[in-house]
Amino acid sequence: MKGLNIVLVEPEIPQNTGNIVRTCGGIGAHLHLVRPLGFEVTDKHLKRAGLDYWHLVDITYYDSFEEVQAKADKNAAFYYFTTKGARRHSDAQYKDGDYLVFGKETKGLPEPLLAANYEHCVRLPMRPDFRSLNLSNAVAVAAFEAMRQLDYDGLEFEGHLVDKNLTVG
């Protein structure tokens, strides 16, 4: 399995990116960060939010989104997550290696990018009077839907109680 690719275009809040690092570590996704970032990667809040999962995540930094596109696997699809999308994120058909793209917390993805790729713009369904989810929550929802469609390839399915003296059921 190649794994999913999570792309953050100009993220601004270190705690969100740290939480996304943790999500990427848990599912084996590659994280792509497009500059400018609204923080230093040494930021204590960023590191604390990702806890001790940084070594489990492959992170690549870029100076533009065009650079991400140029270096991407040509067989992979890009899905642009936006409140302006016309179809649900769960209606997309994700494949191993696809790119899930998210914009900055305050503005989302640029509208020219969305207009040029509108057939691949998807949204998380929400109430009509609700602006948006927190970025790290949106990434988690999207990533786990993609992993569900990929039958959670490479992930552990069953947990176990630590205390062997407890009876289950």
Image (cartoon, rainbow, N blue to C red):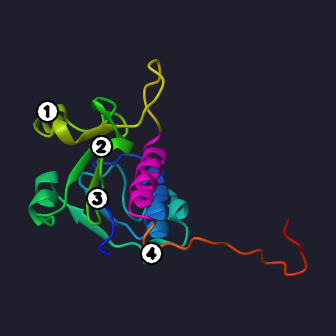
Pointers 2 and 3 in contact (C-beta within 8 Å)? no
Does 110 sit left or right of 41 as displayed? left
Within 10 Å of the Cα at label 4, are there few (<14), some (14-19), or many (20+) other Cα atoms? few
- State the mark number for residue 103: 2
The amino acid pointed to by label 4 is Gly
The image position of residue 74, as x and y in percent, is 11, 64
Looking at the figure, which quarter contains the N terminus? bottom left
**What amino acid is labelled 3 in the image?**
Leu
Which of pointers 4 and 3 lies earlier in the amino acid sequence? 3
Instruction: Please tell me whether mark 4 sits on a helix, a strand or a loop.
Output: loop
Residue at image position (84%, 78%) is 163
Viewer-nearest of discs 4 and 1: 4
Q: Mark 2 or mark 3: which comes first in sequence?
A: 3
- Whichever of labels 1 and 3 marks the residue nearer the N terminus, that label is 3
Q: Mark 3 highlights which residue?
A: 33
Please tell me whether residue 131 belongs to the stretch shown in magenta: no
Mark 4 and mark 1: span between their CA atoms? 35 Å
Pointer 4 residue? 154
Is residue 138 on the magenta stretch?
yes
Main SS category, magenta section: helix
Badge 2: residue crowd in 10 Å (few <14, some 14–19, many ≥20):
many
Q: Residue at x 43, y 44 (%)?
A: 135
> Distance of mark 2 from mark 3, alpha carbons?
10 Å
Q: Which stretch did the figure color magenta?
A: 134-151
Q: Is residue 141 above or below residue 128?
A: below
Residue labelled with disc 1: 115
Q: Nearer the viewer, residue 27 or 58?
A: 27
